[in-house]
Image: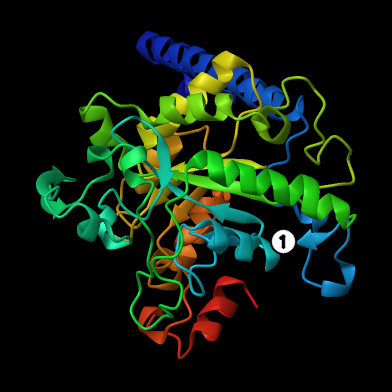
Amino acid sequence: KNEEEPQYRLTVVERILRTNMQHLLLRHLLLLAHLYKIVIAVHLQHGQCPLKVPSSFSTKSTTQISKNRRPYLVTIAHRGASFSLPEHSLPAYRLALELGTDYIEPDLVATKDNRLIAVHNVDLNITTNIQNAYPDRHRTIELDGEKVSGYFAFDFTLDELQSIRVKQRIEGRSTSFDYQFPIPTLQDILDLLYDWNYNVMSNQNKTKRAGVYVELKSPDYYLNQNVSLADLLLEEMDQHPHADEMFFNTKNQTKFGCEEEDSYQVPPFVVQSFHGETLHYLYTQFLHLQMASPPFVLLVDKRKCHMATFWYEIGKLGFLSGIGPDKECVLGEGGYDFMIESKKFDLAVHPWTSRAEVDFVDSSYATAEDELRWLYCK
């Protein structure tokens, strides 16, 4: 419009405000463009594919699945094949791989001597026989604002846990394998994954590669005890002899799957947590190290996913590749709006947890299969 016409004339103050706003907007756009270029460079220079499967590589038809086409949905074995075997055991992870999962998912906590192990919770009594082995090591702490009693991982060294065995956590599932398998370390899990991808699958001339999708459990509690789970994760990944080859490709010798335009593989390493600050810290560390940065996924429970400020908070975490909501966030009221908002941010959505038992099925569905079909959009 012609600003010289009387109805469109701007006062001096209005002109100053408009100019300042234009400059501010330009600065923000330049900053976003700069950050975007950094993220793209870190990911694509190493050939790592995005966490969200691009539509050009996805298919719903089983007859079209090939090197260049795959299901558009990602399967994550939450704590391994935990219906059939005790969760967070090496056999449970291995069974999940044999069943064709894209990812095995270990929950990581730290021991007293700062070794990362995979268990459901910092309280070892939930999934192990720790009480029988160390009956006098029980105590009460404050965790997430509540008093909690148990046998905590950070009170035991890794050597002390060598004799501990895991058990089935959920009532009604088979207990035939209870107390047969030890608590695995992160190093054990990476060994298992390396053997699967580079020995088992390659010997069968199969191109599909599985990944590891780790969760850092209660990182804020550990920080209050001057222990950083994020730093421990970086240290342990650095110590593993095959981590660079599997995940980081600093020597440019690994084929991640997106070096060519016509292929896709899931990113080999994903980090998730309920604690956004921990994810952001890891993101900055990978940028500093100039390594192939893993996708980061923010976990969210059903109490927060529909809060008015939720998507505002997500917007501040611009480095995220995905979001991991309680499945009720997408199954219940407001679920459609939740998915629409996630699409605006171009985030992969990985809900948790789908279980076979009807007791865990959302009330809108008669069976676990019905619920799973809805989650898989079938």
- Residue 79 position within the rendered picture, expressed as x and y whole percent measured from the top left: 48, 59
- Residue 302 position within the rendered picture, expressed as x and y whole percent measured from the top left: 32, 61
Residue at (73% x, 35% y) in the render: 48
- Residue 106 position within the rendered picture, expressed as x and y whole percent measured from the top left: 48, 50
Q: Is residue 131 above or below residue 235?
A: below
Residue at (86% x, 47% y) in the render: 263
Mark 1 residue type: Tyr
- Residue 208 position within the rendered picture, expressed as x and y whole percent measured from the top left: 79, 54
Quadrant of the rendered image containing residue 14: top left
Q: In the rendered image, which residue does mark 1 sit on?
A: 72
Residue at (57% x, 24% y) in the render: 238
In-image side of 237 versus 304 (left or right): right
Q: Nearer the viewer, residue 276 or 265?
A: 265
In-image side of 272 versus 34 (left or right): left
Q: Is residue 370 above or below residue 343?
A: below
Locate the N terminus and report the quarter of the image it occupies: top right
Residue at (55% x, 14% y) in the render: 288
